[in-house]
Image (spheres, grey):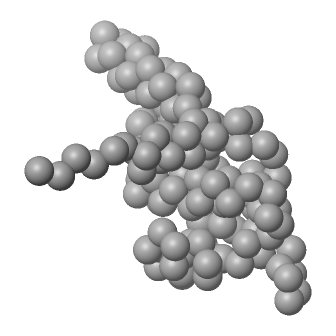
Amino acid sequence: MITVTDKSRIALTALAELAGRGDAGPVPIVDVAESRGIALHVLEQIFGGLRRAGILRSQRGVKGGYSLQRPAAEITAADIVAAVDGQIGVGALPESATGDVFAGAAIAARDALASVSVADVVERERRATDVPMFHI
């Protein structure tokens, strides 16, 4: 089956926020939630899964928060979907003409997500905000 929920989109958005802040150290989850307009309880649930998957590292205490476990260029959207929603294509239909169609779609989706890293998303966001505005 192909299952990608809003939780994966939110996770990618939140990780882009962390990556965009650079090596400033751990970022409190509240700061990420407020910066991206994400409900704190949703982000807490998602970050728990990302931490267990080895994508995020958490630090407790006064200067605590979350940071990326690996470089942003090494974390793909496919990694995030797998951590949050499960592997794409697992439990695909049995081999048949129709099953082959959906298995192919799952492979294409997995390949597309694997081709985009968190660093790519950060760069896309930077380019989108650097677009010059012309006023007449």
**Where, by quadrant of the figure, is residue 48 drawn?**
bottom right
**Where, by quadrant of the figure, is residue 47 drawn?**
bottom right
Which residue sits at x=64%, y=54%? Answer: 20
Height in image: 122 above or below 47? above
Position of 127 compared to 59: left or right? left
In percent of width and height, residue 93 lies at: 41, 26
User: Which quadrant of the figure contains the N terminus?
Assistant: top left
- Residue 84 in sight from this viewpoint: no
Height in image: 38 above or below 54? below
Furthest-front residue in this view: 136
Height in image: 90 above or below 48? above
Compare residues 111 and 100 and report the one nearer the observer.
111
Furthest-left residue in this view: 136
Height in image: 78 above or below 22? above
In percent of width and height, residue 76 lies at: 63, 37
Which residue sits at x=44%, y=20%? Answer: 108
In percent of width and height, residue 24 lies at: 79, 64
In percent of width and height, residue 65 lies at: 77, 75
